[in-house]
Image (cartoon, rainbow, N blue to C red):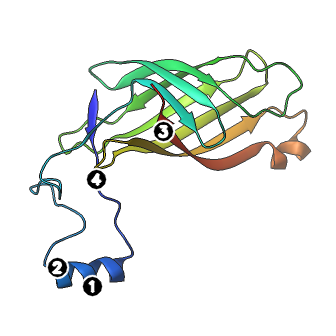
Amino acid sequence: LLCQAAEIPRGEKDGAKEAKESNTTWWPSREQKHPTGNAKQCNLTGWWKNDLGSKMHVTTVDQQGNFTGEYITAVSSTQKPIEPSPLIGSQHLDKDGQCTFGFTVNWRKFSDSTAVFVGQCFAEDDGKEVLQTSWLLREKVDSLPSDWKATRTGRNVFTRIG
């Protein structure tokens, strides 16, 4: 399933100033077309690699936006060998084409942790697709006093590799 990209808005003052000077808007309304005149599309299915070298493969996206796949992390705090881990997620499908999504990765094969990712897919004018994501990782701890160090957060950018 596909999602339409939107231009990333600049700072409000800069964007308003440039829009006034060029007589255009930076963020198209629902009625307007993409600024280039043609809607760019972004498809979640396929192979992606992030800025840390982790890879994920989204194998299927159904008509409701649900998807499955596998995630192969390049980073881990466990001493066990890294193995591909299942991912399951959901993509927001609506008429304006803003492709937001979320997915969960269960690292059960080599770690006592779970991660959740949320993000948005953008297709740039040159056709390059980018997934901007934020994540939370919850690691199992042995006691309540250790709970403070059990959750980590971060951001990753994924690009298509196949």
SS under mark 3:
strand
Foreground mark, 1 or 3, reads 3
Residue appearing at x 18%, y 45% in the figure: 39
Q: Position of residue 51 (x, y in %)?
A: 61, 43
Three-letter amino acid code of the residue under disc 2: Ser
Q: Position of residue 8 (x, y in %)?
A: 35, 60
| Viewer-nearest residue: 124 or 108 | 124
Foreground mark, 4 or 3, reads 3
Left or right: residue 31 compared with residue 118: left
Left or right: residue 90 compared with residue 77: left
Q: Earlier in the sequence, mark 4 or mark 3?
A: 4
User: Total of numbered circles in the picture?
Assistant: 4
Q: Report which quarter residue 56 is drawn in.
A: top right
SS under mark 2:
helix
| Viewer-nearest residue: 87 or 157 | 157
Distance of label 4 from label 1 (alpha carbons): 20 Å
Residue indicated by mark 4: 6
Q: Earlier in the sequence, mark 4 or mark 1?
A: 4
Q: Is residue 71 above or below residue 27?
A: above
Distance of label 4 from label 3 (alpha carbons): 17 Å
Residue appearing at x 76%, y 21% in the figure: 82
Foreground mark, 1 or 2, reads 2
Residue found farthest to the left: 31
Q: Residues within 10 Å of mark 4 (few under 14, many from 20)?
A: many
Residue indicated by mark 2: 22
